[in-house]
Amino acid sequence: METRASFNHQERWSIAVGMLGLITAFGIPRFIYTPLLPLMQADLGFGDDWAGVLAAVNYMGYLCGALGAIFVHSINTKRSLFKISILIAAVTNIGMGLIQQDAVWLILRFFSGLASAGGMVLGSGLMILAIAPKHTATALGIHFSGVGLGLTLGALWVLAFKNLQTWEGLWISSGLLIFVLGLPALLFNQWYLHPQKKAALASALPQQAFKWLISLVALAYFCEGIGYVISATFLVSILQQHTEFPHLGDYAWVVVGLAATPSCWVWAKIAQRTGEFPALIAAYGIQAVGIILPVLSDSIAAALLGALLFGSTFMGIVSMVLVYGGRLGGSKPTQLMGILTACFGVAQIIGPAFAGWMAEQQGNFNLSLILGCGFTLLGAALIWAAWRVQQR
């Protein structure tokens, strides 16, 4: 069984720096918007439709970054853009607290999304290239826990300081936190291509049914993007109106982050035992239950259980799909990971804008969550179809 001890010194540093990139460029700047949103709406009075637009613009930046990453091949260029992504994430968070202009906010959220793609696609690509082939699955399970750690850290930051700082102050202080935590990644220059990786990448060949297989996986990943992003954007706002427990949304968001942190490693182990496709089908199904629970019951238990099921699956799905896509990509793993991430990104643009508009029309998020659950189940069906193609 693989353990951390089996990594050499260079691999350990690569994993640690990659995780810091995910925490600072992706986890904190993307997900702190969710617990800050109710505070901003209460102070400024904007509706769920505008909240959805701000989220969609962030994901549009992520999509552009993911597409751009497809064309970046040099390790040195990836390294430079990775560092720039962390700096942009810090600056855009600070800017959200300093400037209260709609047009500027749209620009800041777009560039924050661009930085998220740098942390996710480029950072993950650098880490994968630096790890021996036999350690890649374990390394990715550890690496992707950075997203859950960043989400949890942002949630706890808001929860701890919301009574001491305004929402503007929380944006600014979180930006400074990103910069401080990102310093080791900014100073790290020893990215390299693992010698064993050269031979593995050169010999990897896509399967004969590659086009059908990857198309089905990409469509399933698109459906996951729709289902995931509604809860990821509005969960705190949905639960914040709970009369018996006013801070339920904040605590549920912490539960999401805590559940997400080990989820990639757990799902990697499950996939090793059952195969990736059965594991993905199970994860999609569990997530669908987590998404729909707040609609079925307004109890505290249902809210926290839904947060637990959602948090324990969404990053597991992301990691399993990207690991599988990277393996199918043969000699160009980053390119295929970028394409899959772009499919996810398109869904994230559509999802929050449409969900926010529907919530403004309906007066609640029930229909949005039902649609999110439906898309997640459709994704599970598409994964099953891809599994059948692979078996043939």
Image: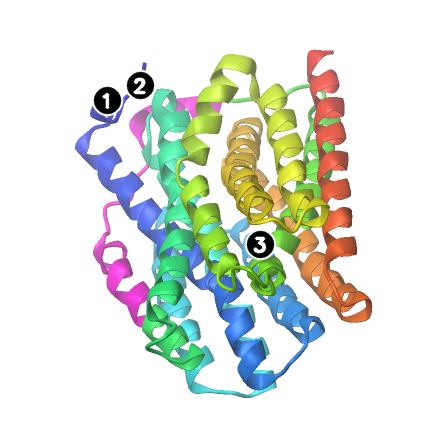
Residue at disc 3, secondary structure = helix
Residue 15 quadrant = top left
Amino acid at pointer 3: Ala
Residue range of the region highlighted in magenta in the rendering: 176-202
Q: Nearer the viewer, residue 267 or 155?
A: 155
Mark 1–mark 2 distance (CA, rounded to whole Å): 7 Å
Would you place residue 350 above or below residue 217 in this image? Answer: below
Element under disc 1: helix
Distance between mark 3 and mark 1 Cα atoms: 35 Å
The residue singled out by tag 1 in the image is 6
Q: Position of residue 68 (x, y in %)?
A: 55, 56
**Whole-Å distance between the Cαs marked 2 and 3?**
32 Å
Q: Which residue is mark 3?
A: 232
Q: Earlier in the sequence, mark 3 or mark 1?
A: 1
Which residue is found at the position 30% from the left and 71% from the top?
176
Q: Are marks 1 and 2 in contact (CB under 8 Å)?
A: yes
Q: Are marks 3 and 1 in contact (CB under 8 Å)?
A: no
Image quadrant where one finds the N terminus: top left
- Residue picked out by circle 2: 2
Instruction: Identify the residue shown where x is 51% and y is 31%.
Output: 323
Q: Which amino acid is tagged 1? A: Ser
